[in-house]
Image (cartoon, rainbow, N blue to C red):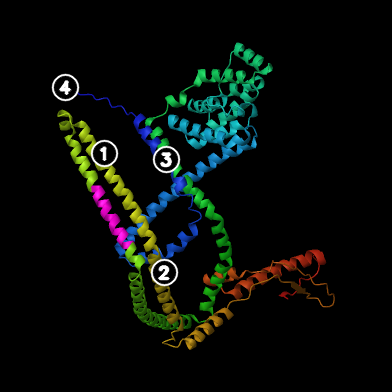
Amino acid sequence: MAKLTALLTLNTAGFQTALKGAKTSAHGLKSSMAGMSSGASKGFASMGSAMKSVATGTAVVAAAVAAAGAAVGALTYKLILSGEAANSADARVRNIAKSMGLFGDQSDSVAERLNNLADKIELQTGMDGNSIQLAQAKLLTFKELANTADKVGGNFDRATQAAVDLAAAGFGAAEQNAVQLGKALNDPVNGLMALRRSGISFTEEEKAKIKTLAESNRMHEAQALVLSAIETQVGGSAKATAAASVQIKAALNQGFEEIGKPLAEALASITPQFLEFVEMAKPKLAEAGQFLVAIFRSGEALNLVWSSLKLAFAQSVNFLWATLRATIASAGQYIIEYFKTAVTFFQVLTTPEFWGGMGNAIIGIFLSAISFLQKGFSEVIEMARPLAELFGKENAFNNIQKTIQESAAILDEDAAARFSKAGDLLEPAAQKIAQRLAEAGGNMKTRFSETFANTAEAIDTSGMQREFGNTVERIKAAIPPAATGKKVGMAAADTENPTAPAVIAGGSGQLGSFAQSMNMLFGRSANAGLLEENKRQTDWLKKIHDNTKNKGTTQAPAEAVFA
């Protein structure tokens, strides 16, 4: 039986190239989304009206929209998380580069180069880019090494790659290796021991040479020798062991990060406003909880529902009535404005400027049409050039072409002059018509607004409003007053040997109004809560009184009361 064996090889080079292009395109989202934070408030304001329209759909459509919204929301959330992590890693490198003070006003460009280097290593090795940037951040804290971070392919770049290769070779995480490398490269004479503990060994000859270079102030050469020894042992390990699927994942992650970065920045820009809103809303939430409990506590639940329904229905009728009257009034105003506009058009039509402008415009159109035909004719007869050259009539043919082209150019120039003159003559007429139309729209809008505002109620709601207001006031009256700091005094049981009452001031007896509301919601009355607190404090104060005032020998006080 014949046996067929196929060898399949996955070539990711083209895929990575395409993904790099996609990443570059995604990076352009930053500029297009730069105004996102300034428009966030408008976006939130319009969201409410958009969501109202969804409610008009069928249940199936609503479910589909909800499912799609959940999927988009989940994807957006993941993109934002990815962007936040990338922004944090970028900022870490940028801040350390600036705080080290080695590059002056070039620190941002150096940090940008290092971040790009991390992206490149991530694509080659499949290692998480944030881990690579964390290793870079730790390497930057070693001054003798950090001052080479502005050189492409310098010792800093080699140290970054070495930290990654050590991790791929099994010598710990890249950021941990960065610390060991930083110590060794910052002080090559004393730092080699740290690398030896990580598994990197040096010959006696290498140690002596490194020491000689460092002591002769040739630090960069000493660092290069250390790095060469490391590269000899583990160089290229990360790239050699990177699986194609891991590289593809790394490339996709970079694309997601580029999309997520502007989203994360926009979210960060509106976060203070959101936190401020939440802080402002906290008292309102407590009030809402109190009011909710008070509705049932006061027995006004049905009255509140009934009075609000009556008032809402009456106000809806009044709104529709006012809208109907305002629409009728604006329709009448439209008729008036229509005749005023017709008069304006008639006035414009009777002016010599209008007809002069129209005449110039028509002549310009005619001249342009002739010029267009001449240019077309010139293109058509160009096909006869070989025949003219055959019979020796090339000069005559050229003269004809030149005449046609010159004539077309003259016509174009004359047409442009005509159009310009027409514009000058017609501009006042156009402005007058535009002003009339704007005035008509303003008059109709004003008529609608005034009629709507001045329309008397079809149903008198004053009594309903009073009824609703009284119901709300009765509910508010059922809300317990906000608790404040209280003083608790003790009355001694033995009146023959009275002792000074112990007084404790402060918040130990304080119960928040929101806590009371929660007690009510979970089946406990506010009075029961207060009694519980009273009993607990009474027992506590008895013990204090026994142990401090009478050294535990006097009878406990009979009671503790809230003053």
Q: Earlier in the sequence, mark 3 or mark 4?
A: 4
Q: Earlier in the sequence, mark 1 or mark 3?
A: 3
User: Distance of mark 1 from mark 3, alpha carbons?
Assistant: 58 Å
The quadrant of the image that shows the N terminus is: top left
- Picture quadrant of residue 9: top left
Residue 2: mark in rendering: 4
Depth check: 267 or 441 in front?
A: 441
Q: Which residues are magenta?
A: 357-372
> Badge 3, how many Cα within 10 Å: few under 14, some, many 20+?
many
User: Distance of mark 2 from mark 1, alpha carbons?
Assistant: 48 Å
Q: Nearer the viewer, mark 2 or mark 3?
A: 2
Q: Is residue 147 left or right of residue 25?
A: right
Residue 435: mark in rendering: 2
Q: Is residue 360 magenta?
A: yes
Secondary element under disc 3, as helix, strand or loop, is helix
Residue type, numbered disc 3: Gly
- Residue at the spot 54% in from the left edge and 39% down from the top edge: 90
Residue type, numbered disc 1: Lys
Residue 173 seen in the current view: no
Residue type, numbered disc 4: Ala
Q: Is residue 143 magenta?
A: no
- Residue at the spot 44% in from the left edge and 77% down from the top edge: 446
Q: Earlier in the sequence, mark 4 or mark 1?
A: 4
Q: Nearer the viewer, mark 3 or mark 4?
A: 3
Q: Nearer the viewer, mark 4 or mark 1?
A: 1
Residue at which label 3 appears: 255
